[in-house]
Amino acid sequence: MPERLIDFISGVEVKATPEEVEAVQPFAHRLVEDFGYPKNQISTHPQHRIARSPSDETQTYPVDIAIFASASKRPEQLQLLVECKQKKRSDGIKQLKHYLDLCPATLGVWFNGEEHCYLRKFVDDRGVNAYEELPTIPRFGQRVEDIGRFLRRDLIATHNLKTIFKDLRNYIAGNATGITRDETIAAEIINVLFCKIYDELNTAPDELLTFRYGVDESAQEVVARIQELFRKVQSEYSDVFEEEDRIHLDDRTLPYVVGELQPFCVTDAERDAIGDAFEVFIGPALKGSQGQFFTPRNIVRTAVTIVDPGPDDRILDPACGSGGFLVVALEHVWDKLAVEAKDRGLGKSWLRRKEDAVAQDNIFGIEKDSFLAKITKAYMAIIGDGRGGIFCENSLLSPTEWSHEAATKVPDGEFDIVLTNPPFGAKITISDPDVLKYYDLGYKWVKDRGTGKWTKTTRLLKKQAPQLLFIERCLRLLKEGGRLGIVLPDGVLGGAKIGYVPHYIESRFDIIASVDCPLESFSPNTTTKVHVMVLQKKKAGESVDADVFMSVPQIIGHDRKGHPIYRPSSPDALWDDLEETRSRWERFRGGKLKTADHLGFSVRRSEMEESLHAKRYLPEFMAVIRRLRATKQPVLRLRDMAIRIATGANVDNLDYVDDASEGVPYILVKNVLAEGITFSNLKHIRKEVAQAFPACQAKGGDIVINRCGDAGLAVVIPKDYEGAVVCGFCFLVRLKRDYDPYYVTAYLNGHLGLMQSKRLAVGSILEHITKADLQDLLIVLPKKKGVIESVAEKCREATEYRQKARKAMETFRATFVEVEKDL
């Protein structure tokens, strides 16, 4: 979490306390974006203060958020205050009432980032302050009496649905009788959501909504109206909902949920409301075990934008989850139809007919989880009546094992577009041999050392990651020339052991785009780093060398805890680099991408190696690679210069010794600096432990290279540290006699060496260089006489100077110990 942030209301820099990040700033956004209050009538920093007691004239109580009747913000104009200090509901409400007793405001909000309470202050028959809970607060310019009287045109879109769902989940779990399990809560809230969506789609702009909760209504009236609305949903979509399905939320909880959701237009939400709801209510534990990490809408939109489905394309998601890809793809096609209708002067009836035809005839999804399949089917039914294309099946099984209807409607080789985020995770693997043998990627592949080509063997694997099998499944589902947008973990896109996967992809697909998504993309649920890959199934006998679009966005709109990140120059705008990625793609597609940086660049397919990581092909890296490939100087790979390249040894903390004279030096990443090895904080390990790792013991003149951290940084081991053991986060390189280690070290620490290392460093949390990639580092050996010797000599001298300085310091310290005895 950053130490400072820019306050959304005032624009001043404030301390980023948990209270500020999790409660004050999110609710300030809601006040402006959802409830329409002008910023100039809100005080946050500096905080408005109220009296501690009726006789207090110093105004010492600070209010987290204060809303006034005008921009002058006079104390007597205080209308509404928000209290965020207390985490517990009971403590927060108690303090909120105390604050309201001491000021003219009649409305108050307690919000802790997860739960809320809305209060109205009034004077009772005895002439004292009393309080009642409200379903929500009035919008700007609205009376309390108007709460809940929403016309369809009054609803507003919001990007804060996830925050609202977290609030609802916490309230239901803490208050609903008999409903505590996340799966049960999810089923309840989704049934309520479909009532709201159905109501939005079937209510005219000037009609009063059925999904509402007014201040003049009893809880029983609200519950009865929502239950009747759900019966209409069941009746119209009887093939989706079971007759026995019910909303079981009690008379206290259901009105709370309605009150919180009623101001917003879910069907116009910026994010997939159903996907967000499921993500919040099911919880990370269940999702992680099933690999169900729901794809953020901005990633979905990026994939759909690049794949660019059209009105005539048959579209499939074979792992559709809650339907996010299908919904965005449908919206994308509908937008195209709307443009066509406008350009051709066609009426609304033509447009509606075309929209319905696309939803019913061209949208298909498969999901093996019955609950998720039901969600997608219901959601598609409500927004476009596309429920007939959603099936509960296991996509990885042969279609002969599906239902007859699914096998008939989802045949291999018939889809123009496949969009998907297949399940992934270390704990979920496919081990059924009957499934594995159905796929080429279910077998072991080997690499020919001579040609570098990968070949499938006849040996069936014991298990395989599902995301790899899904690549092949998508290939079979596509027509020749069909396009695939797929979210894949970085780990499958390159590496010595997994190299057969990029080979498989490149041999069967033309790569259209590779987008390297930030580490925080799926946070806070998982830190798995992913790419959005857009591929096109090759046509038989056709091979085209073309430019591949790539992007490496850095910020995705939220941090690792899921908190929103706003642009420093515009605190009300989310900082999402994927917006620029999509813009760069449009320019690239139109031949107008004039500048190349990390948000948008291209590389020729013929230049790509056995790695599909977009970062590897950043312009600054490719400039170095092209320079090395074009040089007329001799160039060797590090593997050709080395006798041995070994990964260091990992030892236990218990293997350390405090007395250096009793141990062997143990070189860590932090000891490898640009200036050479630092010995001031060098660790030592037991001698018998060091002897267990002979391949990791250094000789004078060996090179130590950082595998992670400052990846690629190199130092030469001085002669007096022969026998030192290199840690597991470093490589130990021993060169052949023909090559000078001091020249190679200088080269590796220079521009050409470090840029190669940065290019090769990959990883989700800690970037590292693989041994296979390190071996392929290109070393230039100048032909000009004396250059190598001159560089090597200067590097050797610097190393020896450091060695002499270290010995002089050791001698001085030993001498001073004797001096200290006489002090």
Image (cartoon, grey):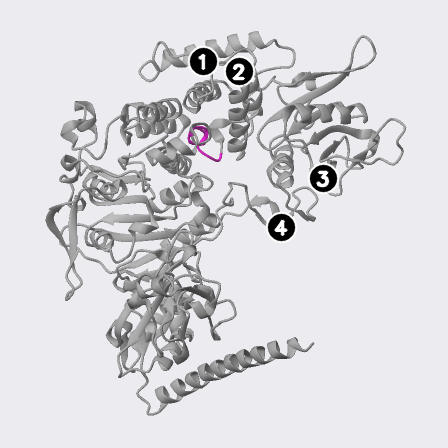
Image-quadrant location for residue 617: bottom left
Q: Which label belongs to residue 102? A: none
Residue 80: percent from the left, percent from the top? Answer: 73, 28
Q: Amino acid at mark 3?
A: Thr
Q: CA distance from mark 2 to mark 3?
A: 32 Å
Residue 362: percent from the left, percent from the top? Answer: 28, 31
Residue under numbered circle 3: 44
Residue under numbered circle 4: 3
User: Of marks 4 and 1, which one's residue comes earlier in the chain?
Assistant: 4
User: Of marks 4 and 3, which one's residue comes earlier in the chain?
Assistant: 4
**142 sits left or right of 522 in the view:** right
Q: CA distance from mark 2 to mark 4?
A: 39 Å
Label 1 sits on a secondary structure element that is loop
Q: Amino acid at mark 4?
A: Glu
What crowding class fits label 4: few (fewer than 14 Cα within 10 Å), some (14-19), or many (20 or more)? few
Residue under numbered circle 2: 254
Up the image or down, 410 lies above or below 466; here it is above
Q: Is residue 133 visible?
A: yes
Nearer the observer, 474 or 708 = 708
Q: CA distance from mark 3 to mark 1?
A: 40 Å
**346 sits left or right of 6 in the view:** left
Taken as a whole, is the magenta stretch helix, strand or loop?
A: helix
User: Of marks 2 and 4, which one's residue comes earlier in the chain?
Assistant: 4
Label 4 sits on a secondary structure element that is loop
What crowding class fits label 2: few (fewer than 14 Cα within 10 Å), some (14-19), or many (20 or more)? many
Residue under numbered circle 1: 247
Dots 2 and 4: beta carbons under 8 Å?
A: no
Residue in the picture at 55% in, 79% down: 809
